[in-house]
Structures are given as C-alpha cells and as structure tokens.
Amino acid sequence: MIGIIGKKLGMTQIFNEQGQQIPCTVVEATPNPVVQVLTPETVGYASVQLGFGEQRLARESKSGERTPRGRRANKAEIGHAAKAGLGAPPSVLRSFRLDDAPGKNPEVPTFNVGDKIDVNIFAVGDIVKVTGTTKGRGFQGVVKRWGFGGGPNTHGNTKHRRPGSIGPGTDPSRVIKGKKMPGHYGDEQHTQTHLRVEKIDAERNLIYIRGSVAGSRGGIVTIRKQG
C-alpha cells in the first residue's frame, strides 16, 4: 500500500466535534518525488521508491578554494536522482510495496518516475501504521531494558537489580540463545499499527495522527495505509 515519508515535529492536542481532547502526533510530510518504479517483471513485485529532503552537493572545484566540511552527495546518488529529474538527491529513500496484500488489493495503483506523493493520499478517519526509530537509551540493565522485578531491598540482599541465574549448570551447560540480558536499549525500528488520522493540513503538509509514534522530534517516519 502506498505511503509517505515525513518528519516528526512533536505532539499536540486537538478537540473533535464532541469536544473531546485528542492527543496527536504532528508529522510534516512534504511532497515525496517518485525516484524509481519497480515492476513484477523485473523484481517479482510492484513497488515505488520515494524520496524526502535534499542532500548537499559539492561545489565546483576551483583553484585555491576548499570544499566546506560536511557530507556531500556522491556521483552515484546524483545520477540516480537525475533519472527522476531531481536537481539534488533526496536525503532519505524508502520503498513502498504496492501489492503487499495479494487478493485484497486486486487493482495495483500505477505511478511514474517524477510523480509527487503528498498528504492528500490520506483522509480523516484513515487507519495507518507508522514506522520510526525509537529513542536510543544506551547500555541498560535488565530492569530498565526488559522490566525485570529485581531482588528484595531488605533482609541482607545485595543483588537489587541483577538478573540472577542466567542458565542451568549441568544441562545444557550454556546460556540459551535469546536470553534477556543487559545491553543496548532503543535505537531500533518500531512500527505502531491501528493509528487514526485525525486531521490533514494540506497547505502546510501536516498530518495529525492520534496517539504517539516511535522516535524523537525531527526523526524520520514512514506512514502507510493499513488495509
């Protein structure tokens, strides 16, 4: 199902016609150009690659002039964007599969390279799923990372937030794969489903989505319609 790439601006609240207060996440989704179109004949399924934002380009080399610091788009990215008629490569590229529900969507929409996808593909009341990157929280213990209860705080106990035994001794004499242990917490992809579109501001390219979505302010999210 087609979707759009946007940037999370933060959260706010709106009031519906019944006067109910609704917490919403505001996503800014400027028109996404279609950078590439894939067909079932080439890769086995139909999908489109959308772009968001713009990368900086390197200056034309002149004698005695230094290139400013910071990342610049390479020649491969510039050439890929030029095929879609873009002057600068997008800073974010995401693919959206169009026939991800065989049998449910017999009519696969068609798009051409250079088309623009904007917030008008959504309407108030649509149910969507939003994918983002959760906030990174560094190295954490099992209590914060997995919600372990920890040990007693009294009666001489000194192991308050430790995980305890992590595996039997004789059999299998090893720690089972997937054991919940301390480690890096957050900074991973997360998809929130069954979210409702509460408001569309086409003039400012804003989408108001009921509830919260993964990521910090300024984080990149993708919004897809949910069948």
Image: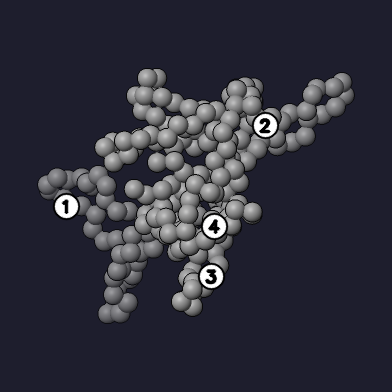
> In the picture, residue 98 is in which quadrant?
top left
Label 4 or label 2, whichever comes before in sequence order: 2
Residue bearing the label numbered 1: 168
Q: Is residue 111 left or right of residue 46?
A: right
Circle nearer the N terminus (3, 1): 3
* On screen, residue 97 above or below 3: above
Q: Amino acid at mark 4?
A: Ile
The quarter of the image holding the N terminus is top left
Q: Are marks 3 and 4 in contact (CB under 8 Å)?
A: no
Residue 134, horizontal then vertical, whole percent? 46, 53
Q: What is the C-alpha distance between the residues marked 4 and 2?
A: 28 Å
Determine whether, in the image, residue 144 is placed left or right of residue 59. left
Question: Mark 1 or 2 closer to N-term?
Answer: 2
Which is nearer the eye, 11 or 30?
Answer: 30
Mark 2 = which residue? 88
Q: Mark 3 and mark 4: span between their CA atoms?
A: 12 Å
Mark nearest the camera among 4 and 2 is 4
Q: Going by the picture, which residue comes out furthest to the right? A: 64
Amino acid type shown at disc 1: Pro
Circle 4: element type: strand
Residue matched to label 4: 200
* Residue at mark 3: 14
Instruction: In this rendered view, identify the residue nearer to me: 66 or 38.
Output: 38
Please name which of the two marks, 3 or 2, marks the residue nearer to the observer: 3
Among the two numbered marks 3 and 2 on one chain, the one whose residue lies closer to the N terminus:
3
> Within 10 Å of the Cα at label 4, are there few (<14), some (14-19), or many (20+) other Cα atoms?
some
| Category of crowding for the residue at label 1, using alpha-carbon neighbours closer than 10 angstroms: few (below 14), some (14–19), many (at least 20) | few
Q: Amino acid at mark 3?
A: Ile
